[in-house]
Image (cartoon, rainbow, N blue to C red):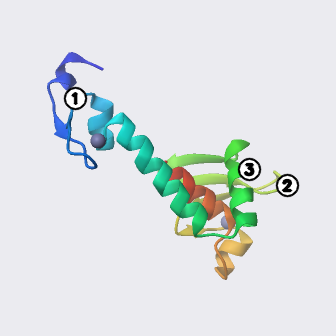
Amino acid sequence: MTKTEATQTANCLRCGRALRAPRSIANGYGRTCKAKVREAARAEVIAAHKPAQVAKALELIELGGIVAVRGRRVFRTVSSDGTRTYLSAPQACNCAAGLKAKHVCFHRIAAQIVAAA
Ligand SMILES: [Zn+2]
Ligand SMILES: [Zn+2]
């Protein structure tokens, strides 16, 4: 937090309260609202997919198998056996299942969860 940035203000997108912390201004939400928005977004992603796929996605995140490469839009993910990496985004993934695009692979679910956070 620097003094020059502290003079900037914005309003929380959720409750409309004035934001002063540069981090909150960058997020668009105050700290409490950001946590609530993140929780809601996560719950929405989790509810939209099969529990088994969500469990794999959460495991991938927990093991640190997903790393942002471009902002919060593109991620590098590790294959189940750890020998390969893929480029995954909430809407696309270059793993075998992702390229067939028949179903949403767990890399994409992990990307959606991380992007929502
Ligand atoms: Zn707020
Ligand atoms: Zn994938």
Element assignment for label 2: loop
28 horizontally vs 4: left or right: right
Please, which residue is most extreme toward the top here?
3
Q: Which mark is residue 81?
A: 2
Is residue 114 positioned above or below 63 on the image?
A: below
Earlier-in-chain disc, 3 versus 2: 3
Q: Cβ of disc 3 within 8 Å of ligand 2? A: no
Residue nearer the viewer, 58 or 39: 39
Q: CA distance from mark 3 to mark 2?
A: 13 Å
Q: Are marks 2 and 1 in contact (CB under 8 Å)?
A: no
Q: Which residue is mark 3?
A: 59
Q: Residue at x 82, y 53 (%)?
A: 83
Label 3 SS: helix
Is residue 114 or residue 92 the one in the foreground?
114
Disc 3 or disc 2, which is closer to the eye?
3
| Image x and y of residue 104, in percent | 64, 73
Label 2 to label 1: alpha-carbon separation: 45 Å
- Between 47 and 7, the residue placed more toward the observer is 47
Q: Residue at x 31, y 35 (%)?
A: 24
Asked if residue 44 can be seen in this view, the reply is yes
State which image quarter holds ligand 2. bottom right
Instruction: Give the percent coordinates (x, y) of residue 71.
Output: 45, 48
Q: Residues within 10 Å of mark 2 (few under 14, many from 20)?
A: few
Residue 97 screen position, x and y as percent: 72, 74
According to the picture, the residue beneath numbered tag 1 turns out to be: 20
**The N terminus appears in which quarter of the rendering?**
top left
| Residue drawn at the location 66% of the way across and 61% of the way down | 107
